[in-house]
Image: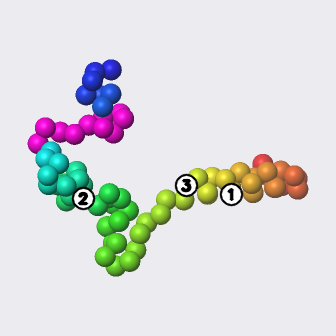
Amino acid sequence: MSTLAAARADNFYFPPEWDPKKGSMNKQQGQHPLRERAKKIDQGILVIRQVGLITIMQRILTALNCQEGLSC
């Protein structure tokens, strides 16, 4: 892996045009740290990902159905 690829993989890559005096990378690029999930933050809406919770609930329900003799 090249040095650039390794730096990007660790999220420590800063492009040459980045100036720390201008603030964070997000400020310089005009992005919110949560990007798309915060596109309606001015309206008080923040999108939350619940993929892990849904997967856990699906597994629990499947296990309960199997115990009751329903389809697995």
Task: Classify residue 27 by image quadrant.
Answer: bottom left
- Which amino acid, mark 2? Gln
- Single out the residue that lies furthest toward the front: 21
Q: Which labelled disc corresponds to residue 57? A: 1
Of the pair 40 and 20, the residue shown nearer to us: 20
Q: Residues within 10 Å of mark 2 (few under 14, many from 20)?
A: some
Write the start and end of the magenta stretch as one range. Answer: 8-17
Instruction: Choose the circle earlier in sequence order: 3 or 1.
Output: 3
Residue 52: x percent and y percent? 58, 53
Residue corresponding to mark 3: 51
- Which amino acid, mark 3? Val
Residue 45: x percent and y percent? 40, 74
Q: Which labelled disc corresponds to residue 3? A: none
Q: Which labelled disc corresponds to residue 31? A: 2
Residue 13 vs 22, above or below: the answer is above
By secondary structure, the bulk of the magenta-drawn segment is best described as loop
Instruction: Choose the circle earlier in sequence order: 2 or 3.
Output: 2
Residue 11 vs 66, above or below: the answer is above
Whether label 2 touches label 3, CB < 8 Å:
no
Residue 24: x percent and y percent? 23, 53
Residue at (22% x, 51% y) in the render: 25
Residue at (19% x, 55% y) in the render: 23
Residue at (61% x, 57% y) in the render: 53
Q: Is residue 13 magenta?
A: yes
Residue 64 vs 43, above or below: the answer is above
Residue 29: x percent and y percent? 18, 54
Real-space Cα separation, disc 2 to disc 1, in angstroms: 34 Å
- Single out the residue that lies furthest toward the bottom: 43
Give the left or right position of residue 54, taking residue 63 as reference: left
Whether label 3 touches label 1, CB < 8 Å:
no
- Single out the residue that lies furthest toward the right: 68
